[in-house]
Image (cartoon, helix red, strand yellow):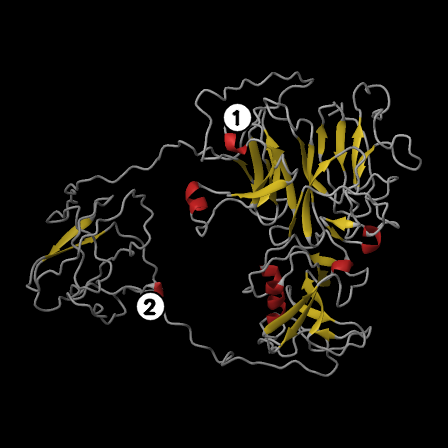
Amino acid sequence: HTSERVLLEVREPASNHNGGQLLFGHDGYLYIFTGDGGRAGDPFGKFGNSQNKSALLGKVLRVDVDNNDDGAPYSIPSDNPFLGEKGARPEVYAYGVRNMWRCSIDRGDPITGQGRGRLFCGDVGQNKFEEVDIIAKGGNYGWRAKEGFSCYDKRLCLNSSLDDILPIFAYPHKLGKSVTGGYVYRGCQMPNLNGRYIFGDFMSGRLMSLRENLNTGKWDYTEVCMGSDKTCSFPKLINSYYKYIISFAEDEAGELYFLATGVPSAHSRAGVVYKIVDPSRRAPPGKCHYKPTPVQIKGKLIPFHPKEEFVIDKKPTTTAPPLTTKPVTTRPQTTTARPAAARTPKRPSSAGGPRTTPRPVTTPPLTTTRGPRTSPPPARSVTTPRPHYGTTTARSGHMPNVPLTRPTPTPRARVTASPRPRTVPTARPRAPLTTPWPHSTSRPPQPTASPNIRTTPRPPYWTPAPKPTSKAQGPNFTLSKSSGKGQSQDGRVEKEGENQVQKPRRRGNKQRKNGRRRSRSGRVRLISEAGDQHTDRGRVEIFVRGEWGTVCDDLFDSKAAAVVCQQLGFPYALRVAKRAELGAAAADVRILLDDVECDGTEKTLLDCRHARVGKNNCSHQEDVGVVCGHSEQ
């Protein structure tokens, strides 16, 4: 750690759009990829950071870090495109990028060398398109004038001096909302993938590929199935693979991997590394023998100890039950032995009578014998076992599908079993065993328990619901007061669900001085502009951790709007208003939720998938609003 040296520091005005890719090119220089500074739409300066060559944000930088142990942190390569331009930073290699997430350098075709040295990057878009670029020296990639192939800032887009380089591929947000750049496959094991650029999308989990058409110069798009053979053959099957693709990797042999997590966040506590395999065609055995070249390093290798268990080829530790049953020895106080095939009857089945299918047991039971009786015997105390529902004994098979037989109703000796006695709580007395259960579909008779005899408690599913006490005879609903509601102190109209009925007050729930209940986490309201008297539309604000805050419009769709409207008492969500169409919050109001994805059945927005509360990559210019209604029109 003492050998660490800071090469470059760049101040950022916002917390998002950090870029961060570092890699060495075939020319030996270090390439640094920076974001545009954050927020939305690159609002910094007259043209934004990305189009400003005097800023290091929104750029591809190239520096030389060799032979700098005693001198400056880095030097500028002599062929950098803006080395002598006035007002431009000499580190800039390309500009006009938004937030390039994962770049790679093509190692070229192993035979012809075609494509060697090309620099591929995935550039995350704003609201409509994601794009893939090939970085060229001195190139302008259009942001913020363009997003993909379309114009974002019309004034800059129509400028004739823009001279931007278009992406090789761009896709709309219907396919995905955050591109993750990958690699061109140059390995040996999957010949059909040779020359394909493999990349993915962080939010949708799509695995995609591009192949260059040498005749037209265009790139053809093909989606790659992420899953097993059965899942890819039948797309409607449930895919258990983690879908949030964070990054790609390439090993020494040119084989590709990617990292995915189960939640849409780079702060996920767990993830899985997958290897990309094409089962349609594999290389011949023995062709792909590769011996990695040893690399000299200055430090010692750090030993790696995985925390997760490696479960491949793991042998089972459980023992299968025996195929045949053996008689079980009895205890000294018993008169007859019970075969192991007999089981303690739990409850009479619907067909009547106990089961007669043999099944092995794991412990020798305590057996007793009873002869035929014509009248009930005197009551006596007997300890009954707990019903063996949900036993934890490990078994490797299932009972054979043998039809149950009904025994004859003639009097015969009955064998019962009871495990080792256990302590019975005195709060629930047990009843004696007086007569065996009849061979019928009715329940066993319920004997009357005397004070000195313990009775058998009812199973949990027989327990009736508790009766209401005198303090809670019924729901005590109170309607919210309409006086003074709906108008905030600054003249804005607040809608907090006038059509809702408040629930009864719980014990220990304090109230404010004016009698209104404290707001709970997850409650929403609609904030309209001053003078707007509509109560069914406005900016969405949510109450979390004792404060009200806004919600970003990233990933916010009609399903999330339906959750908001239904929470406010409206059966329909008519429209989602993005980019602060229904008003932006003040600077002192925090943005509490971002990347909200709902199924439409949740009770609050906190029940939906979202980024961590308080963490966002947007500004108040992306505050979301909704329009609710009592009808679909």
- Residue at horizontal 62%, vertical 82%? 479
Q: Quarter of the image containing the N terminus?
A: top right
Query: Between residues 355 and 505, which one lies in front from this camera angle?
Result: 355
Q: Which badge, 2 or 1, comes first in the chain's sequence?
A: 1
Q: Which residue is mark 2?
A: 462
> Which residue is more in the foreground, 440 or 363?
440
Mark 2 vs mark 1, foreground winner is 1
Q: Quadrant of residue 311?
A: top left
Furthest toward the right, the residue is 86
Q: Determine whether 313 is above or below 15 in the image.
A: above
Q: Residue 2: give x, y in percent of width and height.
A: 76, 24
Q: Is residue 65 left or right of residue 516?
A: right
* Residue under numbered circle 1: 188
Along the line of sight, which residue is nearer the eye, 163 or 310? 163
- Asked if residue 269 can be seen in this view, the reply is no
| Picture residue at 56% right of the left edge, 43% below the top | 222
- Give the CA separation, mark 2 to mark 1: 65 Å
From this view, report whether residue 444 is shown above or below residue 629: above
The amino acid sitting under disc 2 is Trp
SS for callout 1 = loop
Using the rendered image of the protein, determine whether residue 485 is visible from the camera's viewpoint: yes
- 373 vs 588, left or right, is left
